[in-house]
């Protein structure tokens, strides 16, 4: 019974994940006093891409072909590990919050390889920057996760979500994780999803060579990945009201709101300023661990 | 009686050398003679482990220690004699040795062998002194054998420095005689006699006497800072003679020092000699280390390596105890063999390249594969790497050091030999590996040399783990003799 | 020798068996690989010599981990170094090999000297070199001496393991050996140093102070980061792998060092977990590093170059090699569900157990160590994206690369076998962890009968106090595969057959994209070079030849990084030694008068100093 | 008393050798020294009525007073060596240093050796001084022949020491040592010839080809 609920939950989140992206985009446009596209625009994009013909470089190999599927699988597997509302022991047994990091790394690894596969300088640059940013984001992510997990004594997300106490350390860790989330979901100030300008592209440069169905899969997995991060923020940092669909939805909306607000209010940083941002996140997460060690 | 063969055979060989007109038969007979001596010395060693000691003429006294050193000397003599055969012939072919000069070489070679055997078997320490001095005088001609500027310079330095040393050794001998006759009540310089009355001797005089003995014979043994003649002589002497100097001459001088040390230790315990020997041992190793690091000449490199090993032997001897002295004696044996091996290889290489400058020798493995391998094996053996026997003796000395509480000395020793290992291997690998000179022809190795190389390699490999029982007994009773038991 | 009876009998306790298994697991495929690798590259005599050396190398390693006498250990240890030295200098006409070999043998020998001193100190207390006697004998050792012995062993074994800053021999020696030897050296030989540490420090001496573990952890963390950063900068494929060995030794030591700390903090569960994680990473690293070195060897054999800037596109010519290299890269980058991931996850869990269970500053220390591990993992992934991507993907960057052919079966079979192992050791983690926990318990002397590490034999459950942590590589693998399958079939069903047009890579309208316009490894690593510039101290050389102010005819750009350890530690040391030696050498100027004066001075000084003796 | 005077004369002649700037002076100094040594041994032999000692004295006279100086001079003439000895250290300083060495020998003798008679003590002291000064001559003089002379001074010192010690060493040892020294000087002479032939000089300070 529970496992069906959980699977249903996963499918729902997968289905709704483009909506969240559309919602953020809509919010941003509204903040900018623009009309913008509707919140269902990501769905239109996906359906267009899925049915379009695919153009593929002759330099590519099976890595390029399989990367979209592997990336999608990694995002979905990560999502399965997140007990957003319902949780199920057998899925929990697959792994803990650290596992999510490892699983997402699989997708990233293949996307980065695919970026190099076509032999264009854009792809290489994108891969290089993506790996650069993610590797620097890794320590602060781990520290933040440690801080949160230390409060409950377990790295299991289920256990973390099950303790409805808001710790100060959790909040600080949340701030650090939020910065990591921005970096991982290609948001301003780290990356910009909306531009295809050579100098600023990171993620988009990496997948520049993709088109049609493969691009659709990649975009879908980005949406899902975004939901994974938002859900972790929602259930691990503020672990109240777990198991409640409405509270969860509310939290996601709130996070989306924050992201949108942040995206319109600051400019994109150049690559080497991102390092400073990530260092800031690292310092935040170290503080979080410190607070956890003290027990607050 | 084997000892007569050992003493008379060299004299005979020396005496018959002038009868030969050709080098080839003489070299053959010489090598055969030394083989006979080697066999006799092994038989002597076995004999002595049973009999304990042999004395005759009131002049000769042979115990295990003598037999052990005679064995080492005979081994090196044999290999050197075998090697000389090819070496001198090549010299004649290339015009370095003209006319009947080879007769001079073989006669001196055998006279030298005689003096060294005499040193190891004489009882009277005065006669020992005479024999060592004679050995120096004879070998001076061998060092200066090529009669060119450099070799004469080396020979002159060798002669003068060793003469000063030997003079000091004589003073030390006089001191010993003084206290033996004054306090011990004997009027001879017999080692056995002095050992008997050792308890009555005057420690004050013994101390000073030992200083002179150590500096005096130490000059001949190549203990730093009196070692200065050694690299020059190694560099200029024909390669078989260099092997003789390191395997026989240095060891004979050490032998004399050991004999005296036994007397002093019996009188006043091992502390005094121990401290001195450890100090000079470490000093020798340290100085050798510095010179090995900065060395550019392959033969001098070997000279400093000998200084290092002499240092190790005296360190082990100074540390004392059954394991320390046993290790030192075993090291005498190992070093003699390993050094002989490296000379077998290196002599050919330096001759082929017509230089001993290490910067000009590369790729010897390509040009002379067999000699290259021999040098490589010997280099690792000399540097103290297992599974070669020098490792065993070095580790014995280190164990003894820790057993007797000489922690600092042992640690310095181990670090120094590690550094020497590095420098030594660096130099040797530069010579052996790499591309050989473009237009140099590949050179084979004569069968005799091959057999010698394989034989020595086998011995140093096997003795690292197991030694024949008679050898063990010989070593054990030598240790007891030196400890005055 | 009569006074030194070396006991060569063997000892097969769990620790020895574990290492023996690792040695065999790697050596046998490497040996099979060498059949194809050596053929055609060397003369038959040389190949026979190579086999003899390899065999004695492997046997000496096996002896190292099984003998039960310290002197026998030393002999086996030095034989191992010696045979590997000859294998490093196997291409004996290469100037580089000789230099690398010399640095290697010198450093390793000095390390051995430290180990020997350590043994001798232990011997002074135990009176015997037998391991059992040493274990009982060293109980009476005063703490100061124990500390000294620890430092000696750490330096000695650390040199062999390649801990920063004792690592400099490793990146030059490992790549110079023939590839199957690089594989054994990196995969197994440096692990014998870990064996030494476990056997002689943890098992025999016993962990005595807290700072031992702290020191190891700090050194391990430095090794991790330094190793991976250097690897990122490296474009010689085998050298890059060698730097990763330093990194991975760091990760292994994070586990081992954690165990040291936990033992002293009296956290037996965390100690066993940590050590098991370290051992797990040890065997994992053995597998994937051998795999990668063998793969790199295949590339080298096929193309004749190790410089990845000259490679590219090999995935088409060498599909099997590429696939196995990819698996190796994924494993070393800790990608699920392969083996590298499991051990890194376990190490993180061990640190988490520490962070939860320890008190005060250790909580933060453990968390920081975990962060270092995470950073290392991220950087390693970046590095292998570079290594695999530039080597195997896109277009060939040189004629050598475009002419490559797939390797013969003997080489492929080894690669495929090891690739399978990366999967087996990932999926089968629960079984392996149980075994390793047994080994860890034996080494540390902790009773593990009440500890549980797995659930139902397919879920890892590092449970100390019911904290519900689970992880199952098998489940995640099933999920991943089924999602891929469902997605593929689903997309196919929903949208029909994929309509693909093959064309050129998008070139922004510029009509001719060639391999010269591809992204290079140098460019790939540039962000890292800039971020770590405080440590790498990069500098560049540009050379412009221009016709006029506006037209540059040719432009040459070279970028270098400063080898910090070499430049600021080893070169000054060497200069000091050489300078000192050259100065001492002056005491022998060839003047006989001075020589006689030495004798005079010696005797006079001795007479004056007589009362000191 | 007489013997004390002989000893004193030996010391004085040794100092004269230290101060010598020319080969002839050096050899003459050596003749003097050996002569006094001969007198000393002779007196000792007569007093103690040792026949062996008398024989030794006779040998001493033949070899050291007649043969060796003669051959030294012959070599010197034959190779047309320059008379100048070539001093590293000038005579004045040399004498001071030698004085220091004598003082050292004195201290040493007093502290370590206690002979039965005063004369033996004095002989011992002088012999040690001669040995040290002999080495010093070898150190400070450039010519090969001067080094031979230095060696001879050392050997005279040794001989004195040997006779001071209870009337000489065992006889056959003494003879063997004599023979040895005789041989040594001869061989050194041969090498001086060789050096002269190959280098056209006998400045051993210029033999510095082998170093390091």
Image (tube, coloured by chain):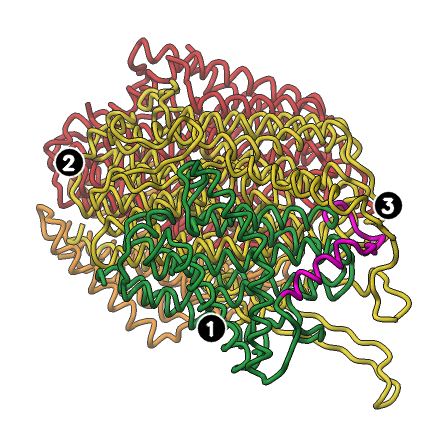
Chain colours: A green, B red, C yellow, D orange
Q: Which residue is mark 1?
A: A258
Identify which residue, C112 or D117, lies in the foreground. Answer: C112
Residue at x 86% of width, y 62% of height: C514
**Secondary structure category for the residue under label 1:** helix
Q: Please indicate, yes or no, whether residue B189 appears anywhere in the rendered image.
A: no
**Circle 3 SS class:** loop
Mark sitting on residue C140: 2
Q: Horizontal placement of C20 versus B56: left or right?
A: right
Residue beneath disc 3: C403
How crowded pointer 1 is (Cα within 10 Å; few <14, some 14-19, many 20+) is rated as: few
- Residue C269 on image: x %, y %: 27, 38
- Left or right: residue C447 compared with residue A29: left
Q: Circle 2 sits in a helix, a strand or a loop, which is it? A: helix
User: What is the residue that sits farthest to the bottom in this orientation?
Assistant: C549
Q: Nearer the viewer, residue B347 or D115?
A: B347
Q: Which residues are magenta?
A: A40-63
Same-subunit check for callouts 2 and 3:
yes
């Amino acid at each position: 019974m529970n496992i069906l609920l959980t699977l249903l939950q996963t499918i729902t989140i997968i289905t709704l994940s483009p909506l969240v992206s559309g919602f953020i985009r809509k919010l941003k446009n509204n903040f900018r006093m623009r009309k913008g596209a509707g919140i269902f625009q990501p769905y239109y994009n996906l359906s267009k891409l899925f049915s379009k013909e695919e153009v593929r470089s002759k330099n590519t190999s099976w890595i390029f072909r399989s990367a979209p599927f592997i990336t999608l699988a990694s995002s979905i597997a990560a999502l399965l590990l997140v007990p957003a509302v319902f949780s199920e022991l057998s899925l929990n047994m697959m792994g803990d919050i650290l596992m999510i990091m490892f699983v997402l790394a699989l997708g990233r690894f293949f996307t980065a390889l695919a970026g190099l596969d076509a032999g264009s300088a854009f792809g290489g640059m994108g891969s290089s920057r993506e790996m650069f940013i993610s590797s620097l984001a890794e320590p602060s992510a781990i520290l933040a996760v440690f801080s949160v997990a230390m409060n409950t004594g377990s790295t299991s997300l289920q256990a973390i979500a099950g303790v409805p106490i808001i710790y100060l350390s959790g909040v600080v860790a949340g701030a650090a994780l939020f910065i990591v989330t921005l970096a991982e979901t290609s948001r301003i100030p780290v990356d910009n999803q909306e531009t295809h300008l050579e100098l600023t592209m990171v993620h988009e440069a990496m997948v520049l060579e993709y088109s049609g169905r493969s691009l659709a899969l990649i975009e879908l997995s980005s949406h899902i990945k975004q939901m994974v991060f938002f859900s972790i923020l929602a259930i691990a940092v503020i672990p109240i009201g777990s198991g409640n669909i409405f509270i969860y939805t509310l939290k996601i909306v709130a996070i989306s709101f924050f992201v949108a607000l942040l995206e319109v209010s600051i400019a994109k940083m150049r690559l080497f300023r991102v390092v400073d941002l990530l260092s800031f996140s690292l310092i935040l997460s170290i503080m979080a661990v410190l607070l956890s060690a003290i027990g607050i | 009686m084997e000892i007569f063969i050992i003493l008379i055979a060299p004299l005979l060989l020396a005496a018959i050398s002038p009868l030969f007109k050709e080098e080839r038969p003489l070299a053959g007979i010489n090598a055969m003679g030394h083989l006979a001596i080697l066999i006799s010395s092994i038989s002597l060693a076995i004999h002595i482990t049973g009999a304990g000691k042999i004395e005759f003429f009131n002049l000769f006294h042979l115990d295990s220690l003598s037999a052990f050193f005679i064995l080492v000397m005979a081994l090196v003599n044999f290999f050197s004699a075998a090697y000389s055969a090819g070496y001198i012939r090549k010299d004649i072919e290339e015009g370095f040795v003209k006319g009947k000069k080879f007769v001079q070489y073989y006669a001196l070679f055998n006279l030298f062998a005689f003096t060294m055997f005499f040193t190891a078997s004489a009882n009277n320490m005065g006669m020992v002194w005479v024999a060592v001095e004679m050995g120096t005088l004879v070998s001076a001609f061998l060092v200066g054998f090529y009669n060119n500027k450099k070799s004469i310079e080396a020979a002159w330095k060798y002669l003068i420095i060793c003469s000063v040393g030997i003079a000091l050794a004589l003073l030390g001998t006089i001191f010993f005689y003084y206290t033996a006759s004054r306090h011990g009540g004997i009027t001879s310089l017999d080692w056995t006699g002095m050992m008997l009355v050792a308890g009555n001797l005057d420690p004050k005089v013994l101390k000073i006497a030992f200083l002179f003995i150590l500096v005096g014979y130490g000059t001949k043994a190549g203990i730093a800072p009196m070692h200065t003649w050694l690299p020059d002589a190694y560099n200029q002497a024909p390669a078989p003679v260099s092997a003789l100097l390191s395997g026989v001459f240095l060891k004979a001088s050490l032998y004399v020092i050991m004999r005296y040390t036994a007397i002093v230790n019996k009188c006043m315990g091992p502390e005094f000699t121990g401290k001195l020997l450890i100090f000079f041992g470490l000093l020798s190793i340290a100085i050798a280390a510095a010179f090995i690091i900065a060395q550019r000449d392959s033969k001098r490199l070997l000279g400093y390596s000998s200084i290092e090993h002499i240092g190790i032997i005296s360190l082990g001897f100074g540390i004392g105890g059954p394991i320390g002295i046993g290790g030192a004696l075993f090291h005498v044996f190992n070093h003699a063999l390993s050094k002989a091996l490296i000379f077998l290889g290196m002599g050919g290489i330096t001759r082929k390249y017509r230089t001993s400058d290490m910067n000009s020798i590369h790729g010897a493995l390509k040009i002379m594969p067999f000699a290259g391998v021999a040098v490589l094996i010997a280099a690792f053996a000399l540097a103290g790497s297992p599974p070669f026997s020098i490792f065993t003796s070095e580790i014995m000395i280190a164990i003894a050091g820790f057993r007797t509480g000489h922690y600092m000395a042992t640690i310095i020793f181990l670090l120094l030999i590690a550094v020497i290992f590095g420098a030594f291997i660096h130099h040797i690998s530069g010579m052996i590996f790499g591309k050989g000179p473009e237009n140099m022809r590949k050179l084979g190795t004569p069968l005799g040399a091959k057999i010698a190389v394989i034989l020595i390699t086998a011995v140093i490999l096997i003795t690292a783990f197991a030694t024949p029982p008679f050898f063990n007994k010989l070593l054990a009773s030598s240790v007891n003799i030196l400890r005055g038991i | 020798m009569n006074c030194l009876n070396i006991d060569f009998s063997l000892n097969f306790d769990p620790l020895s068996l574990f290492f023996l298994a690792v040695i065999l697991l790697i050596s046998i495929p490497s040996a099979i690989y060498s059949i194809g690798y050596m053929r055609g590259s060397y003369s038959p005599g040389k190949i026979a010599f190579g086999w003899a050396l390899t065999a004695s190398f492997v046997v000496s390693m096996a002896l190292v981990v099984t003998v039960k006498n310290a002197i026998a250990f030393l002999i086996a240890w030095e034989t191992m170094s010696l045979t590997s030295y000859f294998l490093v200098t196997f291409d004996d006409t290469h100037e580089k090999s000789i230099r690398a070999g010399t640095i290697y043998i010198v450093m390793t020998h000095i390390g051995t000297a430290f180990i020997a001193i350590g043994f001798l100190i232990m011997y002074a207390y135990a009176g015997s070199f037998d391991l059992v006697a040493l274990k009982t004998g060293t109980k009476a050792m005063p703490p100061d001496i124990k500390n000294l012995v620890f430092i000696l062993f750490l330096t000695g074994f650390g040199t062999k393991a390649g801990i920063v800053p004792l690592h400099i021999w490793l990146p030059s020696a490992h790549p110079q050996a023939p590839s199957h030897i690089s594989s054994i050296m990196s995969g197994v030989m440096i692990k014998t140093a870990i064996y030494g540490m476990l056997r002689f420090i943890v098992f025999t001496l016993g962990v005595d102070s807290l700072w031992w573990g702290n020191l190891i952890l700090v050194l391990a963390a430095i090794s991790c980061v330094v190793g991976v950063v250097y690897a990122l900068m490296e474009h010689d494929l085998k050298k890059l792998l060698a730097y990763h060995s330093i990194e991975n030794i760091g990760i292994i030591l994070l586990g081992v060092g954690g165990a040291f700390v936990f033992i002293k903090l009296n956290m037996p569960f965390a100690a066993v977990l940590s050590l098991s994680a370290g051992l797990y990473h040890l065997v994992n690293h053995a597998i994937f590093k051998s795999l990668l070195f063998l793969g790199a060897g295949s590339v080298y054999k096929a193309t004749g170059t190790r410089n990845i800037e000259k490679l590219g596109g090999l995935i088409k010519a060498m599909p099997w090699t590429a696939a196995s290299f990819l698996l190796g890269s994924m494993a070393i980058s800790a990608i699920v569900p392969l083996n590298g991931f499991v051990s890194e996850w376990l190490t993180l869990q061990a640190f988490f157990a520490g962070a939860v269970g320890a008190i005060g500053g250790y909580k933060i220390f453990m968390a920081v160590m975990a962060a270092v591990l995470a950073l290392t993992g991220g950087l390693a992934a970046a590095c292998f994206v570079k290594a695999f991507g530039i080597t195997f993907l896109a277009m060939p960057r040189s004629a050598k690369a475009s002419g490559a052919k797939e390797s013969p079966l003997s080489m492929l079979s080894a690669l495929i076998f090891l690739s399978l192992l990366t999967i087996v050791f990932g999926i089968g983690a629960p079984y392996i962890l149980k075994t390793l926990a047994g080994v860890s318990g034996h080494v540390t002397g902790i009773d593990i009968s009440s500890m549980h590490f797995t659930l139902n034999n397919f879920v890892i459950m590092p449970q100390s106090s019911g904290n519900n942590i689970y992880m199952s590589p098998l489940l995640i693998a099933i999920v991943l595969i089924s999602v891929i399958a469902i997605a593929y079939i689903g997309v196919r069903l929903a949208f029909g057959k994929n309509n693909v047009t093959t064309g050129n890579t998008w070139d922004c309208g510029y009509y001719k994209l060639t391999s010269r316009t591809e992204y290079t490894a140098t460019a790939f690593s540039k962000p890292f070079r800039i971020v770590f510039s405080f440590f790498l101290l990069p500098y560049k050389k540009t050379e412009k030849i221009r016709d006029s102010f506006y037209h540059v005819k040719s432009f040459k750009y070279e970028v270098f990084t400063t080898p910090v350890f070499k430049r600021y530690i080893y070169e000054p040391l060497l200069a000091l030694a050489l300078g000192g030696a050259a100065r001492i050498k002056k005491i022998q100027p060839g003047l006989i008068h001075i020589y006689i004066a030495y004798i005079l001075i010696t005797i006079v000084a001795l007479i004056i100093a007589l009362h000191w003796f | 008393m007489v013997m004390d005077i002989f000893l004193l004369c030996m010391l004085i002649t040794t100092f004269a050798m230290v101060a010598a700037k020319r080969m002839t002076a050096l050899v003459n100094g050596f003749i003097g020294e050996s002569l006094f040594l001969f007198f000393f041994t002779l007196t000792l032999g007569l007093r103690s009525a040792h026949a062996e000692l008398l024989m030794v004295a006779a040998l001493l006279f033949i070899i050291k007073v007649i043969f060796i100086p003669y051959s030294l001079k012959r070599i010197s003439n034959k190779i047309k060596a320059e008379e100048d000895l070539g001093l590293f250290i000038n005579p004045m300083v040399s004498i001071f240093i030698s004085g220091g060495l004598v003082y050292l020998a004195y201290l040493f003798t007093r502290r370590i050796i206690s002979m039965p008679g005063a004369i033996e003590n004095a002989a011992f002291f002088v012999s040690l001084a001669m040995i040290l000064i002999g080495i010093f001559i070898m150190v400070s003089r450039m010519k090969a022949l001067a080094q031979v002379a230095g060696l001879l001074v050392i050997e005279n010192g040794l001989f004195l020491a040997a006779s001071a010690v209870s009337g000489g060493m065992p006889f056959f040892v003494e003879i063997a040592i004599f023979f040895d020294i005789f041989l040594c000087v001869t061989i050194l002479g041969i090498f001086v010839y060789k050096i002269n032939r190959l280098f056209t000089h006998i400045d051993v300070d210029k033999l510095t080809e082998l170093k390091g």
